[in-house]
Image: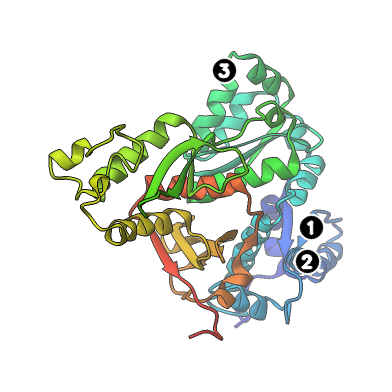
């Protein structure tokens, strides 16, 4: 295999060129870098580069794995590997592993340290150069000062366009950011839902100075239910106060009312029992035969309540084990958002050749995230707006 391979001195110049101003990422980087340095030393050249080791990063970010060898680790994480023990196959597997590690690094230690060490970011003279280096993809972006500190986190379906808006805006906050920003890094998510969840989590975790100024709840109203004296489940829209648990939440009163109107029409609900029509007799929908008469006790409450409970179960995902499938970062990849016992647990990415059908398989690829009212609102809103989104019910391997 090596008979026709080039000698090291023949490719040494090219290695210097392609690694200049770069950080070398390798699985067991100490070994690979030692080989490179030894070979360059034989040529009388002092080769020096920053390195990152995916073995050390994996031990920190994905603890308690049975093995941290590239083959066993990628297999347990569902990362497909072709041409194992060949340079191209191992390099591609390391890239996919490194992407997963970057996603799991919620405190952004890897990126912040890289910005701090990388002089080209600190010397960037024009905001235009930063914009030119950004892609037009869906994901999360991070604005850094020269020392690596994150001063703003945002999400967009087109990162380049959104950052360009920041840099061309004349509002006071944007002007301050323009003066301080030295670099913009980004993370490709493919899925807008993953981007929304990452943005929410990482703002809370990193507390960037220009995000703290926003300080507002992302939802104000909720959909609640109660059973009346006749046994019918009623729906009502009210302010989310944190004391009562809503079925689902909304950013404002208008979107809440729009949802109730649409749901009432789609499921032949009673306008009186959904709070849309104040009357002591029948609602208007009964007059036009779109309501079956719950408002005047004509439809039995058991039949009416079944439709209501189907709506509640669909939008609350309480006590459910499921995974929401959305776009990935490539055509052969999908994102997976895990809901376990009705709580958001995190997200991950998987190759289409890799089957995910139980909780045990998902645990290893998921980046853990916090479940809170904000994340629940983000997921419920996204599901309402993308009603054709695929969801899979999950079971533990021990359960039938």
Instruction: Please state the horizontal and vertical placement of residue 356, each as a whole percent of the image.
Output: 49, 73
Give the quarter of the image for residue 96.
bottom right
Give the quarter of the image for residue 60.
bottom right
Kindly report the distance in space between the C-alpha atoms of the residues bearing marks 3 and 1: 37 Å
- The earlier-in-sequence mark between 2 and 1 is 2
Residue 179 visible (yes or no): yes
| Secondary structure of the residue carrying numbered label 2 | helix
Tell me, yes or no, whether the two marked residues, 3 and 2, touch with CB atoms within 8 Å: no
- The earlier-in-sequence mark between 3 and 1 is 1
Kindly report the distance in space between the C-alpha atoms of the residues bearing marks 2 and 1: 7 Å
Instruction: Please state the horizontal and vertical placement of residue 398, each as a whole percent of the image.
Output: 56, 86
Q: Which residue is mark 2?
A: 29
Disc 1 packing (10 Å; few <14; some 14–19; many ≥20): some
For the residue pair 183 and 345, the one nearer the viewer reads as 345
- Horizontal side of residue 28 vs 154, given as left or right: right
**Nearer the camera: disc 3 or disc 2:** 3
- Horizontal side of residue 314 vs 165, given as left or right: left
Disc 2 packing (10 Å; few <14; some 14–19; many ≥20): some
Tell me, yes or no, whether the two marked residues, 2 and 1, touch with CB atoms within 8 Å: yes
Q: Which residue is mark 3?
A: 169
* Above or below 221: residue 78: below
* Above or below 152: residue 15: below
Q: Residue at x 35, y 54 (%)?
A: 308
Q: Residue furthest left?
A: 288
| Secondary structure of the residue carrying numbered label 3 | loop
Q: Residue at x 77, y 59 (%)?
A: 52
């Amino acid at each position: 295999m090596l008979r026709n391979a080039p000698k090291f001195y023949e490719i040494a110049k090219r290695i210097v060129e392609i690694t200049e101003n770069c950080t070398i990422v390798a699985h067991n980087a100490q070994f690979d870098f030692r080989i490179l340095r030894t070979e360059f030393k034989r040529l009388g050249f002092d080769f020096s580069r920053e390195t990152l080791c995916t073995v050390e990063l994996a031990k920190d970010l994905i603890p308690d794995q049975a093995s941290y060898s590239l083959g066993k680790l990628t297999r347990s994480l569902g990362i497909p590997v072709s041409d194992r023990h060949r340079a191209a196959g191992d390099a591609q597997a390391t890239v996919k592993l490194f992407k997963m590690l970057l996603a799991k690094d919620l405190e952004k230690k890897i990126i912040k340290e890289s910005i701090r060490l990388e002089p080209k970011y600190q010397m960037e003279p024009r905001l235009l150069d930063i914009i030119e280096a950004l892609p037009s993809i869906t994901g999360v972006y991070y604005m850094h000062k020269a020392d690596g500190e994150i001063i703003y986190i945002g999400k967009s379906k087109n990162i380049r366009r959104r950052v360009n808006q920041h840099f061309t805006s004349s509002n006071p906050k944007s002007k301050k950011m323009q003066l301080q920003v030295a670099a913009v890094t980004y993370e490709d998510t493919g899925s807008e839902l993953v981007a929304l969840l990452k943005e929410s989590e990482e703002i809370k975790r990193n507390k960037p100075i220009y995000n703290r100024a926003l300080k507002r709840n992302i939802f104000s109203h909720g959909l609640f239910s109660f059973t009346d004296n006749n046994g019918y489940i009623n729906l009502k829209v009210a302010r989310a106060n944190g004391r009562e648990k809503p079925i689902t939440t909304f950013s404002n009163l208008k979107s809440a009312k729009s949802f109730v109107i649409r749901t009432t029409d789609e499921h032949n609900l009673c306008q009186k029992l959904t709070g849309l029509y104040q009357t002591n007799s029948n609602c208007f929908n009964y007059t036009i035969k779109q309501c079956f008469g719950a408002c005047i006790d004509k439809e039995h409450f058991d039949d009416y309540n079944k439709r209501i409970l189907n709506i509640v179960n669909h939008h609350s995902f309480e006590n459910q084990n499921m995974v929401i499938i959305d776009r990935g970062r490539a055509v052969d990849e999908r994102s997976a958002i895990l809901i376990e016992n009705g709580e958001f647990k995190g997200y991950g990415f998987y190759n289409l050749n890799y089957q995910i059908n139980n909780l045990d398989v998902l645990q290893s690829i998921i980046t853990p995230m916090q479940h809170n009212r904000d994340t629940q609102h983000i997921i419920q809103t996204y599901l309402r707006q993308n009603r054709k989104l695929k969801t899979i019910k999950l079971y533990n391997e021990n359960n039938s």
